[in-house]
Image (cartoon, helix red, strand yellow):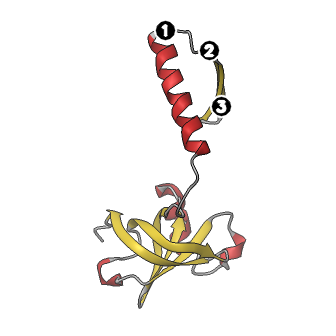
């Protein structure tokens, strides 16, 4: 018996729709069927633990054991924000800011790009607050 599949993919601001049948034995049909079956199995599997929250961002402030980051900023947004945030309340921006606690900050400086795994959840907003489980630099600013 043949199964009919439908997949809608959102990418780069657009979407693509795919329709195919499990009896499609072409290379694309076989790949899409494998992908669809994987998605179906994963969606039906009960999660036994909370997935880790991984965030990336540029360091905007460094204090004792805390880094303030601009989450998911690109380089141009960071360059624009780095001096502006000193004079304006964070709520004035449409960006997400997170205060990461529990960081050995001596190795980080303003302008570094980091990736952090958060313990538990992010509490509040602008800035949200989170405890760091693990952190690593993605880009280290030289000056």
Residue 48 position (above or below residue 129): above
Q: Residue 39 appears in which quarter of the rendering? A: top right
Q: Nearer the viewer, residue 8 or 108?
A: 8
Would you say the residues marked 3 and 2 are in contact, meaning their CB atoms lie under 8 Å apart? no
Which residue corresponds to the image point at 62% horizontal and 66% vertical from the top-left? 96
Question: Which-is-in-front pick, marks 3 and 2?
Answer: 2
Image position, residue 123 (x, y; %): 63, 77
Tell how many labels. 3
Badge number at residue 14: 3
- Say which quarter of the image contains residue 121: bottom right
The reply, left or right, for residue 79 in relation to residue 15 is: left
Quarter of the image for residue 4 reads top right
Mark 2 — residue?
Answer: 20
Q: Residue at x 52, y 14 (%)?
A: 29
Spot occupied by residue 3 in the image (x, y as percentages of width and height): 64, 17
- Residue 61 lies, with reference to residue 32, above or below; the image says below
Q: Badge 1 is on which residue?
A: 25
Question: Split into 4 quadrants, where in the image is the C terminus?
Answer: bottom left
- Distance CA(mark 3)–CA(mark 1): 28 Å
Q: The N terminus is located in which quarter?
A: top right
User: What residue do we see at 62% from left, 77% from top?
Assistant: 127
Q: Which element type, helix, strand or loop, lies under badge 2? A: strand
| SS at badge 1 | loop
- Is 100 or 89 nearer to us in this picture? 100
| Location of residue 105 with respect to 56 vertically, above or below | below
Pick whichever of labels 3 and 2 is earlier in the sequence.
3
| N-terminal label among 1 and 2 | 2
Q: Earlier in the sequence, mark 3 or mark 1?
A: 3
Foreground disc of the pair 3, 1? 1
Residue density around tag 1, few if under 14, some if 14–19, many if 20 or more, within 10 Å = few
**Label 2 crowd bin: few (<14), some (14–19), many (20+), radius 10 Å:** some
| Disc 3 secondary structure class | strand
């Amino acid at each position: 018996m043949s199964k009919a599949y439908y997949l809608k993919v959102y990418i780069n601001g657009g979407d693509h729709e795919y329709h195919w049948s499990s009896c499609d034995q072409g290379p694309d049909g076989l790949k899409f069927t494998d992908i669809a079956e994987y998605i179906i199995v994963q969606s039906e599997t009960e999660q036994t633990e909370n997935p880790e929250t991984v965030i990336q961002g540029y360091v905007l402030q460094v204090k004792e054991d805390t880094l303030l980051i601009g989450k998911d900023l690109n380089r141009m947004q960071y360059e624009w924000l780095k001096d502006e945030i000193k004079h304006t309340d964070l709520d004035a921006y449409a960006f997400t800011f997170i205060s990461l606690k529990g960081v050995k900050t001596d190795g980080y400086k303003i302008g570094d790009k980091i990736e952090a795994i958060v313990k538990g959840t992010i509490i509040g907003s602008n800035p949200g607050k989170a405890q760091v489980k693990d952190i690593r630099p993605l880009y280290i600013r030289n000056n």
